Amino acid sequence: MKVSGFTIVRNAVRFDYPVKEAILSILPLCDEFVVAVGNSDDDTFGLINSIGSGKIKIIRTVWDDTVRDGGRTFALETDKAFKAVSPDADWAFYIQADEVIHEKYHGAIRTAMVVDTDVHQGNGTAAIFGDDASVFTLSIHQENNYPMPKPPSDEDIGLADGTRDQEYLDALEKGLLRSLKKMTPDLIFYVGGADPYREDQLGGLALTFEGLQKRDRLVFEHARRRGIPVASTLAGGYARRVADTVRIHVNTIVAARDVALQAL
């Protein structure tokens, strides 16, 4: 089995991104690692090159800053890095420039569960892992929204337009319990979508700030009870007020902290 890692980065020195540590944290698991280094005002290229590993493959890219709205610039750069991954790779592991995987989990990650709460169905993971029994995909989303059609996840929870807090939380907990009966994963990847928020411009659900934070706690608490580590990523978020999106994402971090501290 060939495992390829990939990431994107720009101005890592200027903004003090721990991209070198991020790459080194996952490099032992990879046969190659693609780094798309964007046009930078500093020596990001030299920083990556200083890793000194034959596994590292650096490609130079130019970011299109005219399409930053909605994160399209990042999506385009990620696509460039992914396309540079060797075609014979069996797995591709994407890590952001400010993320790390603790070495104690290197030998432990054999099965994983994706819990995707973005308002849009997790079509990417559903399609990628559709035939991979080591990864269980759960998606809770607005049914009447992108994408159409939706590739099947292992557990799809399609919700009606305007679904509110309690109905959402009940559906999520039932789906999560069903999923955890089918697999007890070594790791849960939690995709904490901000776009189920009732004032999101691209979503049609009706969750409040409180409902979204209860959602986060629900996932973290079920994982904690079972001793399953969680890697949490931010997703979505197109509220009319940017401050609302920021608040939702910060609340996810606060919920993770609070649950982590419960047993201390």
Image (spheres, grey):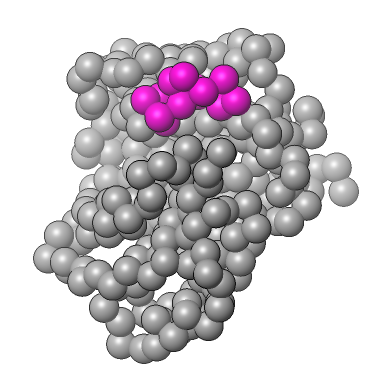
Residue 128 spot, x, y in % from top left: 40, 29
* Magenta run includes residue 54: no
Q: Is residue 120 above or below residue 17?
A: above
Q: Is residue 55 above or below residue 134?
A: below
The count of marks equals 0
Residue 186 spot, x, y in % from top left: 71, 33
Q: Quadrant of residue 214?
A: top right
Residue 191 spot, x, y in % from top left: 48, 38
Q: Is residue 24 above or below residue 81?
A: below
Please give left or right for residue 213 compared with residue 118 in the image: right
Give the residue furthest to the left.
66
Residue 118 spot, x, y in % from top left: 39, 33
Q: Residue at x 35, y 32 (%)?
A: 124
Q: Quadrant of residue 188?
A: top right
Please give left or right for residue 198 compared with residue 46 in the image: left
Q: Residue at x 26, y 78 (%)?
A: 39
Q: Residue at x 61, y 66 (%)?
A: 24
Please indicate, yes or no, whether residue 208 appears anywhere in the rendered image.
yes
Q: Residue at x 43, y 20 (%)?
A: 130
Task: Magenta stretch: give its range.
Answer: 125-139
Give the residue furthest to the bottom.
42
- Location of the N terminus (image quadrant): top right
Please indicate, yes or no, whether residue 210 appears anywhere in the rendered image.
no
Q: Nearer the viewer, residue 20 or 90?
A: 90
Q: Nearer the viewer, residue 46 or 220?
A: 46
Q: Quadrant of residue 107?
A: top right
Please give left or right for residue 165 compared with residue 31 in the image: left
